[in-house]
Image: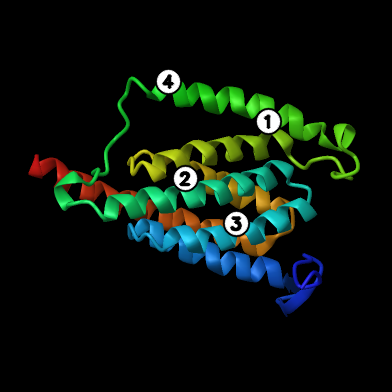
C-alpha cells in the first residue's frame, strides 16, 4: 500500500507521462466530488474526504506544503460540511437554508482574511524546511502563490458549506491559478484536472445562481 501511495510509482504511461496511482485515483475522485457539489448532492462530502487524503499525501511528496495543509483542512471540513448538509436535509423544505449571496458587509472580512492569510502562510511554508527539517526536507515550491490558492480555498469551503453563492467565484480563481501551478510542478494530470474543475465551477455557479433566483422568487 505504501508503494501505491508513492508519486513515483507508475500506474501507466500516457504520451510519455508516467501516471502514478495516487495522482490518477485522486484526480478521478476529485472530479466526481466537484461534479456532485455542482449538482448540490450531499455525496460530495464523503467522496471529497477520500480524495483529499490522496492529494494530501501527493502534495507532501512534491513539496507543495501549503497545498498539503489545505488538504488537511479539507479533510476536517469535509466531516463538518457532511454534517451540516445532512442536518439541513432532514428539515422541512421551508426551513432549509437557501443558496444566498454573501452580505456585502461581510465581504471585507474574508478579503482581509485572504490577504493576511496568504502573507502568514506564505512566510511559514517558505521556512518549513528550516524550522522542521525532519519533516520537510526541501524548500517549498511557489510558497506565496501556493498559499494564496490555499487561503482562497479555505474561505471558499466555508462559503460552500453555508451554501453561499460567492463560493464559486473564489473556486474559479483557484482553478485558473491551479492550472498553471500544477503544470509548472510537473503533475500534468492535476493541471488538466483543474481545467475540468474550472468548467465544473462555472457550471456550479450557473446551477446555484438558478437555485438562488428560484428561492428569491418564492419569498
* Gap between marks 2 and 1 measured at Cα: 19 Å
Residue at the location (73% across, 39% down)?
142
Residue at the location (46% across, 57% down)?
45
User: How many C-alpha atoms fall within 10 Å of the one at disc 4: few (<14), some, or many (≥20)?
Assistant: few
Q: Earlier in the sequence, mark 4 or mark 2?
A: 4
Position above or below: 176 against 4: above
In this figure, which residue is indicated by the disc labeled 2?
171
On screen, residue 112 versus residue 139, left or right, reads left
Question: Would residue 50 be seen by someone viewing this image from the given angle?
Answer: yes
Kindly report which numbered mark, 1 or 3, lies closer to the viewer in this rendering.
3
CB within 8 Å, label 2 to label 3 = no
Q: Earlier in the sequence, mark 2 or mark 3?
A: 3
Q: Which mark is residue 52?
A: 3
Residue at the location (50% across, 64% down)?
47
Question: Would residue 170 be seen by someone viewing this image from the given angle?
Answer: no
Secondary-structure class at tag 4: helix
Q: Earlier in the sequence, mark 2 or mark 1?
A: 1
The percent position of residue 17, horizontal first and vertical second, equals 74, 71
Kindly report which numbered mark, 4 or 3, lies closer to the viewer in this rendering.
3
The percent position of residue 217, horizontal first and vertical second, equals 10, 43
Q: Which mark is residue 121?
A: 1
CB within 8 Å, label 4 to label 2 = no
User: How many C-alpha atoms fall within 10 Å of the one at disc 3: few (<14), some, or many (≥20)?
Assistant: many
CB within 8 Å, label 4 to label 3 = no
* Gap between marks 4 and 1 measured at Cα: 19 Å
CB within 8 Å, label 4 to label 1 = no
Secondary-structure class at tag 2: helix
Amino acid at each position: 500500500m505504501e508503494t501505491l501511495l508513492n508519486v513515483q510509482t507508475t500506474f501507466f504511461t500516457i504520451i510519455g507521462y508516467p501516471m502514478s496511482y495516487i495522482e490518477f485515483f485522486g484526480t478521478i475522485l476529485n472530479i466526481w466530488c466537484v461534479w456532485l457539489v455542482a449538482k448540490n448532492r450531499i455525496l460530495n462530502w464523503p467522496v471529497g474526504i477520500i480524495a483529499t487524503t490522496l492529494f494530501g499525501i501527493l502534495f507532501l511528496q512534491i513539496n507543495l506544503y501549503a497545498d498539503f495543509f489545505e488538504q488537511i483542512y479539507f479533510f476536517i471540513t469535509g466531516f463538518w460540511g457532511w454534517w451540516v448538509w445532512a442536518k439541513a436535509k432532514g428539515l422541512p423544505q421551508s426551513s432549509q437554508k437557501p443558496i444566498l449571496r454573501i452580505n456585502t458587509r461581510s465581504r471585507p472580512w474574508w478579503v482581509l482574511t485572504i490577504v493576511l492569510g496568504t502573507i502568514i502562510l506564505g512566510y511559514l511554508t517558505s521556512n518549513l524546511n528550516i524550522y522542521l527539517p525532519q519533516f520537510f526536507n526541501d524548500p517549498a515550491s511557489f510558497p506565496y502563490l501556493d498559499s494564496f490558492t490555499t487561503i482562497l480555498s479555505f474561505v471558499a469551503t466555508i462559503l460552500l458549506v453555508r451554501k453561499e453563492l460567492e463560493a464559486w467565484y473564489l473556486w474559479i480563481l483557484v482553478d485558473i491559478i491551479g492550472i498553471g501551478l500544477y503544470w509548472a510542478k510537473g503533475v500534468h494530470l492535476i493541471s488538466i484536472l483543474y481545467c475540468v474543475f474550472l468548467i465544473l465551477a462555472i457550471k456550479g455557479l450557473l446551477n446555484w445562481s438558478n437555485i438562488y433566483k428560484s428561492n428569491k422568487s418564492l419569498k
